[in-house]
Amino acid sequence: MKKIIIAALFLAGFLPAYAQQQEAPKLYTLPSPFERYTHYLATARVMGAVPLGSFADSYIDKSSFRNASISIEWVLRNSPFSIGGEIGSTYFQKRIPRTLYQNGEGTISAVQTRTLSQYPVELFGNYHFLRKTSMIQPYVQVSGGISILDNVLYYGTLSSQHQKIAPKYGIGLGSKFLFKKDGAVGVDVRVKYDGTAYKHDYIEKGVSSVNGSIGLFYRWW
Amino acid sequence: MFKKASIFLLIAGLGMASCSKDPINDLSTEESLVYITNHDKAANFKQYKTFSIVDSVVVVENNRSGTALTDIDKDVLTRIITKMQALGYTYVSPKAKPDVGINVTWITNTYLNVVSQPLNSYYGGYWGGGFGYGYPNYYSYYETAESYWLITLLDFKNPNTVDKTFNVIWDAQVRGAGIGNRQYVDTMIDSVFGQSEYLKIN
């Protein structure tokens, strides 16, 4: 809060001077503060995700649009890197029409509803290809952390639940688009591969998906 | 700037809230039904020719049992007789020494759950001074109940003479919403027999 007020006061003094730059002596030709200082950047994203590999083959192959995340990062000064943390929520669901399932001696006939909720908590590092003053800032991302999983399999209305905290990782490619040069707000677009090391019942080789997200970000220093 | 920041939070909030949707609230009553059947793999069903069935449904509630013969019970018993005859068995009176006997049971298990009140002693913060509230032991109770149909096929032909029991050679459970509705009786009974082809002797 205080910082924003200080920033506003600073800009109030800075901008008129900038406007008169042609006549005035070049006192204020400093580079952008986003280039001079390590600054903060917060992003809120909504995502669509497509299940991949054996997770899609053996459990849920239906795409999901009920995913979101919030991240905060430190954009390092004099460096193309930024580091941060991201928390999110992803949800996959699939309905299987009535089928017979053999379970030992028994036979179960039911409509299955397969669900998998994940709450990932990750640390990430971004490498930016262009300078911080650029209005378009493409980046690559590597992330790692944990995922809090809630796997609920319904037979009709009967449910069996399995919860676990499992390691997860991700590799992403994205870009930030600032609304105006040196501005604080912009759009973030990212495509990311997510993998979670989790095995239970139908899920034999982990959970993997590709998700595409669109988000808004705000940066300050 | 603050307006833009609050839009962030709103979007994120919406995203999070949408995840708490109940995944099975769109199931139809028919889809909610679950049929579970088990059978004795050693049993050779071809050796049985005749069957009989109980004249009313056994109602078991929390280990207390009685019998009932309501409209839905009659429907269930009648449908079972029809299905057994279709599979090749002959319906006989219980006195005529049937090879197999069928029990039909309606089971309700009620679970009593208890929570203590207040849920958390820190609710007492308002009056301040570092004091909590001295509550006597208030407890609240709530009940959850689950009902299901259980149909069992007993082997009267080969009774276990040592410990005087009849072996269960097949059983079927029907669970889910709508099991107390007459409309679904035929669907329920046809399904449990339909998924047990080994019962067929003709």
Image (cartoon, coloured by chain):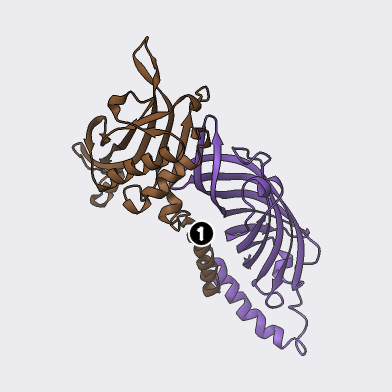
In the image, taking residue B14 as reference, residue A217 lies left or right, namely: right
Residue at x 71%, y 60% (from the top left corner): A191
Q: Residue furthest top?
A: B162
In the image, taking residue B73 as reference, residue B154 lies left or right, namely: right
Q: How many marks?
A: 1
Residue at x 31%, y 35% (from the top left corner): B105
- Chain letter for the purple colouring in the rendering: A
**Can you identify the residue that label 1 sits on?**
B16
Q: Looking at this view, is B5 or A77 the one in front?
A: B5
Q: Looking at this view, is A220 or A190 the one in front?
A: A190
Q: Is residue A183 above or below residue A166?
A: below
In the image, taking residue A159 as reference, residue A3 lies left or right, namely: right
Residue B26 position in % (x across, y down): 45, 58
Residue B61 lies in what quarter of the image?
top left
Query: Can residue B121 be seen here?
Result: no
Q: Looking at this view, is B200 or B8 the one in front?
A: B200
Residue A114 position in % (x across, y down): 55, 48
Residue B121 position in % (x across, y down): 28, 42
Please state which amino acid type lies under the numbered disc 1.
Met
Query: Can residue A152 be seen here?
Result: yes
Q: Colour of chain B?
A: brown
Helix, strand or loop for disc 1: helix
Residue B184 position in % (x across, y down): 37, 51
Q: Quadrant of the N terminus of chain B?
A: bottom right
Q: Residue furthest bottom?
A: A23
Query: Would you call the spot at circle 1 few (<14 residues within 10 Å), some (14-19), or many (20 or more)?
Result: some
Residue at x 43%, y 28% (from the top left corner): B49
Q: Looking at this view, is A149 or B69 the one in front?
A: B69
Q: Is residue A220 above or below residue B118?
A: below
